[in-house]
Image (cartoon, rainbow, N blue to C red):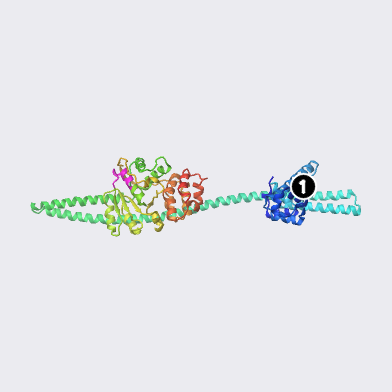
Amino acid sequence: MKYFHLLTEKDIQTICQVYPYKEMIQGFKKNPRAFNDIARGYRPQAISEDRGHKLLYENSNSKLVTNMIDGLLDRWISGVRQQIEELIKAGDTESEAYIKAFQTSILPNFVELYFRLTENPVSKEYASVLSAAISIVALEKQRNSHLASTLSISPEALEKERKKYRTEIREKDSENKKKSKEIGILKAKIADLSATIETLQGELECQIIRIKQFEQTEVIQRKELHDAISVNTTLDAELKRLKAELREAQVTIDTAKKRESGQQAIIDTLQSKLSEIQKVAEDLDAKIYRESDNLLCPVDIDEFSEYLGYNLSSIGVDSSTDEYFLLDDFLGDILFQDKPIICNRIAGIALAKCVSNTLCGSQEIKVLSYTSEVTSNDILNYLRLETRICVLDGFLGNYNEMELISILRSIKGRIIFITFNYERTMAYLPQEILLYFNYVNVSRIKGFFSEAIIDEDASVIPEEWTSVAHKSVNGRAERLCNEIMKQLGFGADVTMLLSQRMISEEKLVQYLAFSILPYSSEALDCRPYEVSDRLQKYAGEQGKCKQKSLLLGWFGNE
């Protein structure tokens, strides 16, 4: 059996110092080539005992020395075991057998090492008592032998003295076993208490995290409420102004009707204007109501997802892959949150055309491209056009993002794509931009770079204004998202916002694949699997994530 790997440096040094000289020389002679490697130019029999012990220790990592030490330990342990068995069969107690067996062994003073190598650990107190007993008995045996030879002490007296020491050893042995048992009980209690403390500590940390998340959620909701109130106030003022114009127009019409019939043309014009003002007023009334807390969504979201999938397939996205189903469901979620979508130019325009062909009956979209002459009024006029899908091309990274956020927050009922030319643009924008936009990265899907033309038939999916549906958060997915994003370097507010969307583990995988991990690579400039232990545990080679192969293939080598 191999024992060398179980030895400490001190064990090796001590064994080399007491290695039997004759066995050492025999070991050198049996392996002349290996011996020549450690003592070139010497013959084994010419090596002195001190020189031999020094050679053993200096070359303790060589195969020759490790084999010699393993052989010595194997013979020693086997000899001790055999003698103990014979002594116990002859009527000795276990402790007596150990004392006698070690006394006659080739390594009599290595009691603790014996129990450690035989994987039969004993307490330090017991090993110390046994070592002391071996030393005492050996010394006493030597002294008795000397006294017997000089004073001719009778064997009966020596046997009586031996019995006395045996009694003392048995008492010490009994006392040591009792103490070892008590120590074992105390260790078990300590282990139980440690486990209880660790469990309670974990529960406390979870509660603290949840409390912080609730506090952060409240801050964001208050801010959103304040913004909504501000928008409603603006719309209310506009409504009052239009109603005032309506009253003025009505007065003008009443006055004109009293005039001569030749002014009928003026009356008709004013009547037309009155109708237009009434329509605008009605639209504003409806807008104030429906835009306060409602979203414009497909009546049948499953139908939308099905037709969107056909359009994605038509540009080259493989419908048999995991990324196809994940992306289809992911887009069905973020497109109707009333938040603009930011992505690179190639993918953004391709996505916008697919969504338009699915939802609006045509893949033709109107694009407002960035130039240095574009003003906020130009953007507002474009976004107020009667079109469901809008694309602000090249604005991110060029236009003031705070002014852009202010403009976009006043627009409802539009699916807005905002593009940039390079993915690294995200690294130069504040991370808080993720509070106002949905970041999408599909650069790892080949279909978006094929430049294929959409050949899927256009469809029109009915939509309606509906109240915001608050879905239950999946506790495990929320915790995983929270821990992974924190380890990747996301801020607490962004982390909390995205964690609240984790209604399932599949939703977590979607956000990891198309938003969180791409952002950490491009904007935070980190390798996700090297930075986040929690990601490695969840979606690494040994993780339980069903789509771990996809995530590892995309982000494992970055």
Instruction: Name the residue type under label 1.
Output: Tyr
Horizontal and vertical percent position of residue 490: 45, 55
Please state if 558 lies on the left or on the right of 356 as rendered. Answer: right
Q: Position of residue 152 (x, y in %)?
A: 91, 52
Question: Is residue 10 highlighted in magenta?
Answer: no
**Within the magenta stretch, is there residue 356?**
yes
SS assignment at label 1: helix
Quarter where residue 297 is shown = top left
Query: Could you say which is closer to the camera, residue 60 or residue 464?
Result: 60
Describe residue 149's horizontal placement relative to residue 529 as left or right.
right
Q: Which quarter of the figure is the N terminus placed in?
A: top right
- Give the magenta-colored segment's residue range: 351-364
Seen as rendered, the residue at the extreme right is 152
x and y, in percent, of residue 73 in the image: 72, 48
Look at the image and tell me whether residue 121 can be seen: no
> What residue does disc 1 label?
98
Q: Is residue 67 left or right of residue 228?
A: right
Which of the two residues, 277 or 361, is positioned nearer the viewer here?
Answer: 361
Q: Please give the name of the residue rendered at 21% of the width and 56% of the height, measured from the top-left corner.
A: 244
Task: Classify 10 Å Cα crowding around label 1: few (below 14), some (14-19), many (20 and above).
Answer: many
Closer-to-camera residue (452/409): 452
> Taken as a whole, is the magenta stretch helix, strand or loop?
helix
- Indicate the position of residue 216 as horizontal and vertical percent values: 43, 55
